[in-house]
Image: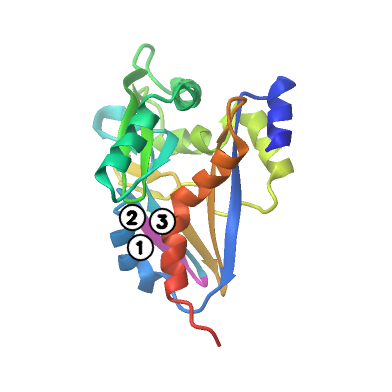
Amino acid sequence: FEQVQAYILAGDCYQINLTQAFSAKAEGQLLHTADAFWTLTNAPYSGYLKVEDFEILSCSPELFIDFEAHGQITTKPIKGTMPRYTDPVKDQLSKQALINSQKDQAENVMIVDLLRNDLSVFAETGSVQTPKLFQIESFSQVHHMVSEVTARLKPEINPLDVLLHALPGGSITGAPKIRAMQIIEELEAEQRGVYCGSMGYFNFDGTGSWNILIRSLQKQADDLCIWAGGGVTIASDCDAEYQECFDKVEAMLDLLNSWYTPK
């Protein structure tokens, strides 16, 4: 955390999405836990993929790019998180704190600008719009601040080229993106694997939908891993950023641990 802030003060970057991994040994297939995880998270961009002994179980709340008819595209970056509470008064106060957070708004708008730039390379001139800014979406464990960027692709553009050019998503790297990725590579203790990548599909007509692989489990043979992180800016507090990781995945970790049987 301190090194990230040192890079910010030195002018290398404005924001870094710093993450950590939680890992364990596990038997069985992730597929058999999918219903429990999807019921727990109620996430709109969930998915499952298995290739030989490699599995991804995603409970993602974040849309990366939605490819719609007539070349319309939408991205919905998340930046800004506060925990949910069973007490409705505490829950509303938590939501209101996120609504009023200038720090989270500053983070969010940085990523919106980054994604507008990524999409403008392929978009018709003047078509890049931001119809929603700083909207609050509430999920099972957290409130998120979500914005929306839309554009219309040039007729000659292949949607797959847009997806590959825009990866990885700006909301999970930082700004500026290339320097942010270099700093992440230097500072994070473990490789991210599929985490913060994307899972989705294309139809034959070029429409399709792709998520950001957050709140997602990766299993390779018996090695199980889940990650969590957050955007660090000059205004960030180390303890708050660390707690945010647990706000995001604590319920998923608790569910995983509920199946643990000592040998």
Q: Residues within 10 Å of mark 2 (few under 14, many from 20)?
A: many
Tell me if label 1 and label 3 are in contact, CB under 8 Å.
no
Query: Can residue 164 be seen?
Result: yes
Assign the N terminus to one quadrant of the image. top right
Relative image position of residue 226 (x, y in whole percent): 52, 58
Magenta span? 47-53
Residue carrying label 2: 41
Q: Which mark is residue 58?
A: 3
Residue 207 in sight here: no
Circles 1 and 2 in contact, beta carbons < 8 Å: yes
Residue depicted at 68% across the width and 46% down the height: 188
Q: Which numbered disc covers residue 204? A: none
The residue that label 1 is drawn on is 37
Q: Earlier in the sequence, mark 3 or mark 2?
A: 2
User: What's the residue at 36%, 57% (across, down)?
Assistant: 47
Residue 218, placed above or below residue 208: below
